[in-house]
Structures are given as structure tokens and as C-alpha cells.
Amino acid sequence: MFLGDLRSALIVSATIPVALFLAVIVTVLRGESANLLSIGAIDLGIIVDATVIMVENIFRHLAHAVRRELSDPETRLSEKLNRILAAAVEVDRPIFFSVMITIAAFLPLFTMQGVEGQIFGPMSRTYAYALLGAVIATFTVTPVISSLLLPARVNDVETFVVRQLRKLYQYVLPLAVRNYGLSATIAIAFLEFVACSGRDWAPSSCQSWKKATFGFAG
């Protein structure tokens, strides 16, 4: 969406079925149940993060490459494939380690026992399977689809949404830095609201958060 290119959005969305398909296959092979807690808790935004980085870098390489007039179609195709390969290799290690760090964040959930383990265990395992599927799709499916759908020359321009967000950011950032005290107060109030928004079903969490933050219980 932010690239303003429908083909790039289609390439990114192709990762979702591959990741979910692998997650379901591994879940079935391990004899685990696929239910709302395991499959339904998967965040598609995290699943496509790696693919977004890959597609954006490929798009950037195609847009900023030195343009030459080539009459031979095979030469043009070879040059485009080389650019896609260079873009993919440029971000392969950062993508891989970022996904591994995300999976490592779920390690404490793997060690839970009792009711907590029954609730969060299937979710964390399915999440890890889906992330691994997303990485495999990012390194294999994404460059291939990019070579088929993206032209050799693309225009890297800011969309209307990006321009408006940039204007808003450039206006708000100096105000937030100059009034850092007010900014910190707003941030703390927002955190309190988020922490206590579920007080109807978890009042002890809200009270504990207030004690840890402000030293008193509201």
C-alpha cells in the first residue's frame, strides 16, 4: 500500500497462504490440534514483515538502478534478475536473524506447564511454524514472483498517504521534543489506560501495574 503498487501488494500477500499451509502441515504431522487458540492467534502482520522488507528492497533496486536502453529481451531479463538477486542477498541475513529473534521471544511460552501451557503452548508452536514458513516463502517464492510480476523499470514515488504521514510527523516531532514533559505524561497516561482497560476481568493486573508505576493502588 505504501509503495503505491498493486503488484507489490500481491507479492507480499502470497506469503500468507504459504506460511499458514506449512503451519497446518507441521501441526497435523505432530498430531496437535488446530483450533482457535493455535491457528486463530497468528498475527498476519508479523507473518509478512520479512516479505515486506524483501519486496521493498527489490522495488528500490529496480527503481534506482542505472537505466540503459537494451534491445535484446534476454539481456533485459538477465539484468532484471541480477538486480532482484542482489536485492534479495542484501537483506537475507537481517531478515533471517530478525525472524529468529522473534521466535526466541516465544521460548518462555514453550516451557509453561499446567493450564498456561495448554493455552499458550499450541499458539507459540503454531506461531513458530508460521514464521518459519514465512521465511522460506520470503527467500524462495518472493523473488520468483517479483521476477514475474514486477517490470524491469518501476517508479519509486511517495503515495498520498505517505506524504500526509510525513507532514504530520514533521509537524508533531518538534513539538514532542520541545514539550518532552507533556509527551512523557501523555505516554504514561496511555500506558495506564491500556494496562487497566481490561480491569473488568483482570483487576489485580491493573492494581499491580499502578503499584509498580506510581507506588499506590487506585
Image: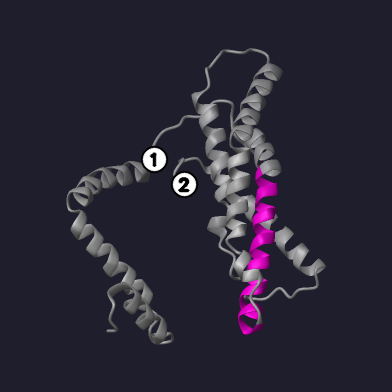
Determine whether label 2 and label 1 are within 8 Å by CB: yes
Q: In the picture provided, is 142 more to the left or to the right than 188?
A: right
| Numbered badge on residue 5 | none
| Label located before the other in sequence (2 or 1) | 2
| Residue wearing tag 1 | 159
Q: Please determine whether, in this image, residue 157 is positioned above or below residue 129.
A: above
Q: In the picture provided, is 33 more to the left or to the right than 156?
A: right
Taking the spot 66% from the left edge, 39% from the top edge, the residue there is: 145
Three-letter amino acid code of the residue under disc 2: Met
Q: In the rendered structure, does residue 136 fall within the stretch colored magenta?
A: yes
Marks 2 and 1, Cα distance to the nearest angstrom? Answer: 9 Å
Image spot of residue 4 (x, y percent) = 45, 41
Three-letter amino acid code of the residue under disc 1: Thr
Q: How is the image coloured?
A: one colour
Image spot of residue 6 (x, y percent) = 52, 43
| Numbered badge on residue 1 | 2
- Callout 1 crowding tier (Cα within 10 Å): few <14, some 14–19, many ≥20: some
Which portion, as a residue range, is magenta? Answer: 114-138
- Callout 2 crowding tier (Cα within 10 Å): few <14, some 14–19, many ≥20: few
Q: In the rendered structure, does residue 131 fall within the stretch colored magenta?
A: yes
Q: Please determine whether, in this image, residue 74 is positioned above or below residue 42.
A: above
Taking the spot 57% from the left edge, 13% from the top edge, the residue there is: 69
Q: Quadrant of the C terminus?
A: bottom left
The reply to whether residue 66 is in sight is yes
Quick one: which residue is furthest to the front in this view?
Answer: 215
The overriding secondary structure of the stretch rendered in magenta is helix
Task: State the SS at label 2.
Answer: loop
Taking the spot 59% from the left edge, 37% from the top edge, the residue there is: 91
